[in-house]
Structures are given as C-alpha cells and as structure tokens.
Amino acid sequence: MTAKTVPVDTFDLVIFGGTGDLALRKLLPGLFRRYADGQIPEDSRIIGVARDKLADADYRSKVGEALATVVRGEASLQSKLEPFLQKLGYHALDATLDTGWQAFAEELLTHGERIRVFYLSTSPGLFVDICTRLKAHGLNGGKSRVVIEKPIGKDSASAAVINDAVGSAFPESRIFRIDHYLGKETVQNLMALRFANILFEPLWNANYIDHVQITVAETVGLEKRATYYDGSGALRDMVQNHLLQLLCMVAMEPPAAMEADAVRDEKLKVLRSLRPISNDEAAQATVRGQYRAGASNGCAVPGYVEELAALQPGRTDSRTETFVALKAEVDNWRWAGVPFYLRTGKRLAERVSEIVVAFRHVPHSIFEHGAGPVMANKLVLRLQPDEGVKLWLMIKDPGPGGLRLQHVPLDMSFAEAFGVHQPEAYERLLMDVVRGNPTLFMRRDEVEAAWKWIDPILAAWETLREAPKPYTAGSWGPSAAVALIERDGRTWHEDEA
Ligand code: BG6
C-alpha cells in the first residue's frame, strides 16, 4: 500500500540553528523525505541560518553528510539527494546583532508574498532577539509563521515571558509550539481509535477503566546536551510536555470537530483538571531517579555524573533527575478515582514508549478455578518502536480437554498491516506548519497550564531536598518506582507476548 501525499503550497523555510543537532538529525532528513515523496514544490526554498560563516556549497555538503545515513538505508532516495540539496541556501547571522538582517530580509522578500516558516531551533534565550528582528524587517507578515521548540521556559513564569516575546511579533494563530510526540503516528491513531469507533468510547471512563500507564523509556544517556539537560531534568524535559500531552489525548472529551481550537480546548480542560500534587504528597506520589554505571544494549556505560564530568570537567556531582515516575489524577466526572501512572527515564532497559489503558476486571467469574485466572482487558498503544495497537482479551485455550482461559493480544502492527514507511513525527508536523494547521501544536494556554501543574512538584522537590534515587543503567529505574504503583495493588505493564 502506498501512502497518499498531498503537495503543499510553495514555501520558504528558514531554520535558525540550521547547523545544529536537531536540524541535521531531524528537520532536514524529514524535509528530504517529504521532498522525495513529491510533497514539496520545486520552487520552495530551505534556508539554514547560524552564526558560522559558510557558503551555500559548504552548507549543502554538511547537510549532504547528515543525509548520507538516510540514503544508505534506502537506495531509492539516492537520485533525489542532489536536487534536494540544490534547494538549500545558507545565511550567516548573529541573532543578537543587527548586522546582516537587512540583506537577509531582502533575499527572502525577492519572491514576494509566499508562505514563510521560521523554525527557531535555537536556545530559547534567542527567541526574543530573533522575533524582534523578524518583526523589525517586515518578515512577520500574513503568510509568515514561527515554530518554537521546547523548552518553553523552566516554569510558568519564564514560559509566560517567552510567550509574551514571541506573541509581540506573531499572532497566536501563527505561532506553532511543537511537541513532536503529537506527530507520532500512534498518537494520532489514538484519536482515530477513540473517535472513529463506537467500541471504546462507552467504556472510556472510571466505570470501566481501572488505571492508565504512560511510559516513555529511553536507552540513551545524557548524549552531548550537558548544559541543557543538567539544568532541566526529566520532569521538565519529558513530563511537562510529551507525557502530559499523551495524557491529554487519552483523557480529553471528544472535541466537536477535528479542528485546532476544538481539540486544544479539550486538552486544556484536562490540564486544568489535574489535581495539584502538594508538598506533603510529593514524597509518595513522585519518584526521582538518576542512573549509575551499568549496561545499555549490551555495552558497559558510565553513570550520569561521570558522563557529565566528561563534558564539564570538574563536575563531581549533580542532583538532576534522569528518571521520573509519578501518579497523576484527573479530577473530573469521567476520570474520578482513575490514576494515571507516568514514568520516563534515560538509560532504561529498553527503548519503548507506550500507553496502557487497563480496564477493570469482570464483576464475577463464571469459570472454575482450573480454567485459570480471568485477567483484565488492556489496550496497549505502542508509539515506538514497532508502532501498533494490541488489545488484550481473554479467550478459550484452543483444543479439547476442558475449558482453560488464555490472555492473548489482538495485535495490529502498523508496519505489517499497511507496509508503508511510517513518517517521522517531524515530517508530518513540518508539513502541517506549511499548511497552517495548528491542531497538533500547543497553544499558549496549554503550555502554561502544564507548567502550573509542574511548578508545585518542582517546589516540593526543592523543599524535600532529597537526592535522586540511584538506579543501574539498563534497569527499569529505581525500586521506588515499582513501589509507587504496587502500593496501589497494580504493576507496571510488561509485554507478555
Ligand atoms: C526530546 C527530549 O524532546 O525528546 C530528549 O528533549 C528525548 O531528551 C527526546 O531524548 C525523545 O524523543 P523520541 O522521539 O526519540 O522518543
């Protein structure tokens, strides 16, 4: 089966931070794939901007190297590489100085009014400078949009400062706050499953759902992001955005239409219904961890502090958490009493992101003891790897010899079922920006509501002043995370298949 591709209108896309890691690892490969699929019109332009003095040809060869791995994996892309590279231009600019901006604006404006996307793949410290200068040079006109990456602040106060600054140059309708988890195929499939089927919605509430688990486990460690990550930690880096967005997709009411504000209004209501975790509750309802030396994918790996010291000589300690588990509650009619257990961490046993909706047990079992236990149904949505959905059901063990029960998954692997390349989250989201569709992007009030729930947790941790609990790299996190869920008589989901 081939994926259907609808071409977008001609555009200019400017990537601030065009030589950075995100641009080279995600944005440009994503754009390349969209180009190879014929979605990007020929006269569109992609312009990298950074401080280094590079000629267009240097930039093209830098991007060409980054794309070599994509092409190596798929020979059919080879013939598209050179024409794609020819679309790329480069402009050296220092966002904090006025020099060069006039020439940059003139170059962009040569093509008259067309869609212009400014992707700020830079540190948030530069958002204000860039937006102010885009405005001063008339680059914030009707067809221009700006994309901002997290971290959008460190708490609600700093998020408001960033939002004010970006908002003074662009109206909210043209600010795209990206959370790449919303571009993942399974996350959108959750919308389809919930709202395009009659089957689940009648059961999607506290009467039939026992609890929900959201796990985003990574095997990577600190990578090269010492300054950012050590100042941030897993709660800010992953929970405030990705995990809370996933929680919203599970918990929200059906929007009236698949339209940006309808969807975002419903997500906002969920965020505002999250029960605040007080100072007193934080020790029981949250777990912070930090990895120690261990093994990852069969290789010995150092602990977090040693990795940090290698990047920041002289560092001997850090209290930054690389793991968080917590229990959240949504205080509304639909979800009263249904805990949402969230966990995420680096250097865990496996790279896996999934949402588990655990249904209640049947009210009464008619089967004899020998039939085996009647296990509760579970809906498991796997975001990565091997995107797909499994619905765990009880069936009769096939064959003669009495009635024994078995818990088996009704298994839909998207790759097997559809046999198409699953687009990377960024591919889809970038095309949504060009189309001007903000449904899968966060509105200002959502980001700020998420911070309002996170702020008291950060404050409680500050008050508790406990060091993060150690866990061995390659494990599933500190034992306290197991205790967190087991105290409630539940366990973290493990794939039985
Ligand atoms: C980013 C975080 O937003 O998401 C990283 O800053 C994390 O720390 C990454 O590694 C995970 O994304 P994915 O798509 O690989 O699950």
Image: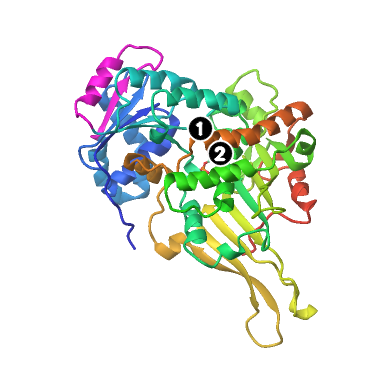
- Tally the marks: 2
* Residue 302 image offset from top left, x and y in percent: 65, 34
Q: Does the residue labelled 1 lie within 8 Å of ligand 1?
A: yes
* Residue 97 image offset from top left, x and y in percent: 38, 12
Q: Is residue 314 at least partly visible in the picture?
A: yes
In screen coordinates, is 68 left or right of 496? Answer: left
- On whether residue 88 falls in the magenta region, the answer is yes
Crowding near the residue tagged with mark 1, few <14, some 14–19, many ≥20 C-alpha atoms within 10 Å: many
Which segment is the magenta one? 86-113
* Residue 317 image offset from top left, x and y in percent: 70, 24
Pointer 2 residue = 241
In screen coordinates, is 319 left or right of 369? Answer: left
Q: What residue type is labelled 2?
A: Asn
The mark nearer the N terminus, 1 or 2, is: 1
Pointer 1 residue = 150
- On whether residue 140 falls in the magenta region, the answer is no
Q: Does the residue labelled 2 lie within 8 Å of ligand 1?
A: yes
Farthest residue, direction bottom: 400
In screen coordinates, is 369 left or right of 253? Answer: right
